[in-house]
Amino acid sequence: VRESIPLDKLMPEWYVNRNGDDGDADTNNHLVPLGDALRAMFPRRIFQSSLVDDTADHKHTSPYAREDDVSYEGDDLLLKRLTLYFKINVMTWVNNPCCVICGDTNTTNCGMRGPMTTEEQQGQAGRVELYKCPTCDGHQTTTFPRYNSARTLFETRKGRCGEWANLFGLYCRSVGFETRYVSDFTDHVWVEVWSHLRGSWIHADACEGKIDEPSMYEHGWGKKLNYIIALLNEGGGQVADVTGRYSRKMLSDEMQARRREVTPSEEIGEMIIAQINASLRTRNNLGQTRQDELDRRASDEKNFFHFVQQSDTWEGSLYAEGRISGSLAWRATRQELGDGKGGRRGEPNGIDGGNSTQEGGKRLHVESCYPFPFDGNNNVISITVASGSSMTIHSDLSDSIVVSGAPCAVGTTKSISIVIVDEQTGCMLQSRSFTTWDAAACFLHLVPNERVVAIFADECDESSLDVPTQRKLSRLGGFDWQHISGSEEKVDDKIEVVSYQVLFIGQLHHHPDWAFFKSAPSSCVLAINVTIDISSSSDHSNLKLRVERNTAPRFVSCRLPEASMPLGTQLLANEQQKRQAFVTYMESEDSNTSLYSGYTTRDGVPVYLISTASFPFQHCGDTGSDWTTHHYLPEPLVPENDEICLSEDATSSLVPSYDIPTDVDFFRNLLGSSLLSKDSTGNVSSVETAEALHNSRLIALYFSSSWCGPCRKFSPILAEFYMLLKEGALPSHGLEIVFVSSDRDSESFNQYYGKMPWLSCPFEQQSIKQSLSMRYGVRGIPALIVLDAITGSVVVSADQSRSEVAIACQGGDDAITELVTERWLQSLPLESKCIMESLALSCADDNDVDDTGGDFETNNYLVRKLSKTGNDIEEEAPATSPQEQIKAIFTDLVANKGLAPNAAAAKAIQIYSEGQKHPKIPHLDLSTGALNDTPWTCSIYAPSDIIGQTDGDGWEELSGSGSVGFCQKKGRAGGAEFNFPTHQLDGGPNSDSLRQIAETAKKYLDNSKKDPHTNRFRRFKLSNKIFDRIVRVPGGLDLITTQLGFVVYRTDTDFFASIPLAADLESIKLSINRLLDGL
């Protein structure tokens, strides 16, 4: 079976062909004259997508690739494509078999019998369906054995869901997936596959060609589920009730009634499954380690189902399509057509299911990254902006913008991605994406002058380009905001709107010669690179280690060398000891220290060194919260108290030192002059509304009552949510809740409120409750409405807040914190967020200067100082209102120009209006601080007609194929060049280190070849003492991932290396042998 699966077509991006190269030698023929350094400037996809020759090699694009592949990686992506391949190319669905005599397809069922023939018995047919043919005088002519033997099914390749799941399970196991069979008692079957990347089982239904769609049956098909049982055929076997994965109605009376038709009670159902597992375990032939792992998985899964059962809401997007396998009549008979509304997915329910660009600007978990902070021989900034995007292992990141080798753009299509780079060090400071130009301009308005800016915008709405937005964008020297919109073109006698993309690299408040702007149709393949020499201005001594808690990189380079700290010591050392060992190593004269920008670690694992390839850093889940990443940044980006202190209260640094400017009058009018509050002992007292809401960033109104069943169910969940924020993530400047009671009497209110930890409106003030219900349209309870404390605007409506809270509580502490900090706070009105950013910056400035005043320059690192009116200090802020300005113009026209009053009034309005249409552009200094006098090189890869439109002289064509070309322009002292640093293995290509890497990799490969169908032989902890022979060598992991086909990924416990299930083991062996032969 494994030999029949075209792994090279499913995962061509992993597949190494048997000639030992990557299979695309001809892809870049038109770039042969270019050196590796030039070619490395741009994403490889740019060259591939620009080829127009129909005979070009497209082996790197899988025919089973789909747009949503970006949500998957590694072996999970293989599973996704394998499922689709199986549906398209392997199995045939049989509604009713053709007549074996005449071939008529309209046979009808006329009964069934047991297996009688040798073939039926060998194929383990559970039953044999009988069919009669209308053409053959209605006689029974055809049989349809329902085979269970996977060997027989591999030959026949036809059937319904039972046959499909049976054979697909074999396909999954033959590739190397841990697979279990899933039986739905309402007549459907599928499989689940264990994902090492996720640490959980993934749903896979080959009949539909879908994976990871647990809402498919209940929400999509409309099935009335009762029991869904999973069976694992390993060891003695294992059985599990997994209904909780596929239903969000487990606690409903309707679901419980259906389950009681199968078992008398939940307790008895659990007891039956436990007895089955106990019996199966007597046949267990597994080792204790493996058995412990399976038990841990079962426990984690049970805990997950317990959390899920507390909510009747699906997390993420809902599957909104009825069943597609089987005939329409058959599906209708089974009532599996869904609601008939069609559509691939429903609207997101709870956590955002796809909007990657919030209005306030989506950002990375950690935005700042310093590529090669200690590489003294590479003092350049190299920035590439390229059309389209290729998602990396981190699904929120794209290579539309690359800074010194690190992809760092947030957002993909129909968004505006902006990356801010420090002009003195080349450090990436901020990376954001926006859906509108006015939001992007508001962000840029706060960025200090001199900063280097890279922008990629694709198919964005230019309707937000009002006068204030244009004024803010005018700080970007060379950014032509008048040419960022699309155009109308006539195609086949129809007018079509052609969307445009915008690529820009420049500097705020300056217009250096190397600044580049290009607007072109979104269909064009276009890329620009600007490389600037900053050796005259860079200062690498002003660096400090930044600590990122609950954070890990996507990739590690190697571990801390043995000479700095032995492996055994690293596994036992505490955080301070590891940090000191790392700092000592970075101060040594090792030739590879210039490649590293920090390290990551947790208890019980080594000190893993990180480099540019490690970016972006990822937020860890709840179980991986003790991962900590330390990386070098310019000192102004690192808080003074950002040091390791094991005894320090973790929440002490979470409280900002500035106050929230709450709209006290609004909330006093809304809630009354006083609220009820509780002290630490639970005593209730009346508190002034202003005092009760002091320093709350979000204020939630909770409409609830003790007589309401759903309220009694949701209140404990909300209390858990609230206390986690108060006691941990956001003790201040976070969320405050005000209870608005619908209880019928004060006694019920007092009893119900006695269980709540938050504020409350006094029960006696029923008029306030009625006013609030009318104001916010509350029609049912429980209802939670989240307001902005500064403006009073609704941030989260009642329709979504309840489900979001329930889902976050299922995900644990980190999910709760992320919901509030990354979603709710990012959904605040733009003006509110700008006020808070300004407060944070001014407070930081105040903390860093003494009473006698001081230099603000080093403190305004991310946000510049503005005048009180919000305008540039360097610009003259308008001091008068529009009416006063028109009046001044009118007076001048009458007094000095001699116009009659009526004519002067009309002229004054016209002059003012014209002034608003053409905003004053601030003066752009072309020399001082503008990086205008340093060596630089600008390169462009684009269609020939686009290159022909490039402004200015001095462009040199380096290569071209007629349709696309590569041009370059250099300024000052022959230009600048970025040389991507690489590890230097001691002794060069004949080193003992290189042989050690190759021989160790070969041992692991040989083990995998002995049993290629078993996943556990293909994955290895990086801290494993044997695999450490590779990890401890600088460049070892780079070598096995880039040349030998291994992959590296992180779990909650450690980093792992693996040989991909789709990899060609023989080709990897050839690569290793070639490497050894060369030594």
Image: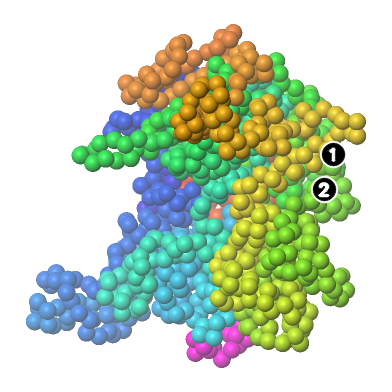
Dominant SS of magenta comes to: helix
Residue 536 lies in what quarter of the image?
Answer: top right
Q: Which of 658 and 251 lies nearest the eye of the viewer? A: 658
State how the image is colored. Answer: rainbow
Residue range in magenta is 257-272
Q: Is residue 1072 visible?
A: no
Q: Is residue 489 magenta?
A: no
Q: CA distance from mark 2 to mark 1?
A: 9 Å
For the residues labelled 2 and 1, say whether their Cβ atoms are less than 8 Å apart.
yes
Residue 195: image quadrant is bottom right
Point out the tag, 2 or 1, that comes first from the N-terminus: 2
State the SS at label 1: helix
| Label 2 Cα neighbours within 10 Å, binned few <14 / some 14-19 / many ≥20 | some
Q: Does residue 229 sit above or below 586 in this rendering?
A: below
| Residue 437 percent location from the top left of the image | 52, 39
Q: How many marks?
A: 2
Q: Which residue, given by chain and number where applicable, does mark 1 sit on?
A: 847
Q: Which residue is mark 2?
A: 657
User: Label 1 sits on what residue type?
Assistant: Asn
> In the picture, residue 252 is in which quadrant?
bottom right
In x, y percent, where is residue 881?
61, 38
* Disc on res. 117: none
Q: Quadrant of the C terminus?
A: top right
For the point 33% across and 67% down, which residue is it?
A: 325
Residue at the location (47% across, 64% down)?
A: 318
Q: Looking at this view, is 232 or 260 the one in front?
A: 260
Query: For the point 42% across and 77% down, which residue is it?
Result: 223
Disc 2 marks a residue whose amino acid type is: Ser
Residue 863 relative to residue 164: left or right: right
Coordinates of residue 685 in the picture (x, y in percent): 85, 74
